[in-house]
Amino acid sequence: MIRNEANTRKQLIDRALESVVWKDEYLNCEYAFTDGKKTLGGGKEKQCSLDYLLQYNNTNVGLIEAKRESLPITEGLQQAQDYGSKLGVRFVYSVLIY
């Protein structure tokens, strides 16, 4: 069975975070950090949101971007790096499991 993004998060990432005792109060899931820029003609660009933002003492310390199993291994990495740059996060992870 090929995992979709939701299953990747539930079966792999959530369990890994639990195993290292990452507390819920330091974890923002489905974190939206823009509402989408307005474009000419009254439209909006896509909203930016990431799968997990890891925080400690009100500081963003890492982010995790999950992707479904059928995508290339590099698919989420650029997205994670872009989000990390926008949020000032030095440690970014893109998760694809094969």
Image (cartoon, helix red, strand yellow):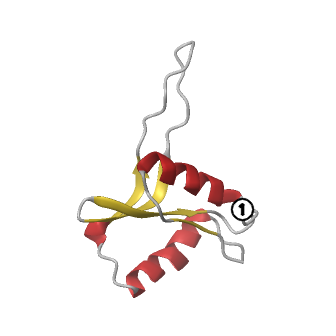
Mark 1: which amino acid? Thr
The mark tally for this picture is 1
Task: Give the residue drawn at x 58%, y 71%.
Answer: 8
Q: Farthest top residue? A: 41
How far from the left and from the top, in percent, is residue 16?
47, 82
Left or right: residue 89 compared with residue 40: left
Q: Farthest bottom residue? A: 19
| Above or below: residue 13 compared with residue 36 | below
Classify residue 70 by image quadrant.
bottom right
How far from the left and from the top, in percent, is residue 82?
56, 49
Local crowd size for mark 1, using a 10 Å CA cut-off: few (<14), some (14–19), many (≥20)? few
Left or right: residue 82 compared with residue 74: left
| Above or below: residue 41 compared with residue 76 | above
Quadrant including the N terminus: bottom right
Label 1: which secondary element: loop
Classify residue 27 by image quadrant.
bottom left
How far from the left and from the top, in percent, is residue 7?
57, 70
| Above or below: residue 16 compared with residue 92 | below
Quadrant including the C terminus: bottom right
Classify residue 71 by image quadrant.
bottom right
Task: Give the residue drawn at x 52%, y 26%.
Answer: 44
Q: Which residue is mark 1?
A: 74
How far from the left and from the top, in percent, is residue 57?
23, 65
Task: Give the residue drawn at x 71%, y 62%.
Answer: 74
56 vs 50, nearest the viewer: 56
Left or right: residue 23 compared with residue 52: left
Task: Give the residue drawn at x 29%, y 67%.
Answer: 26
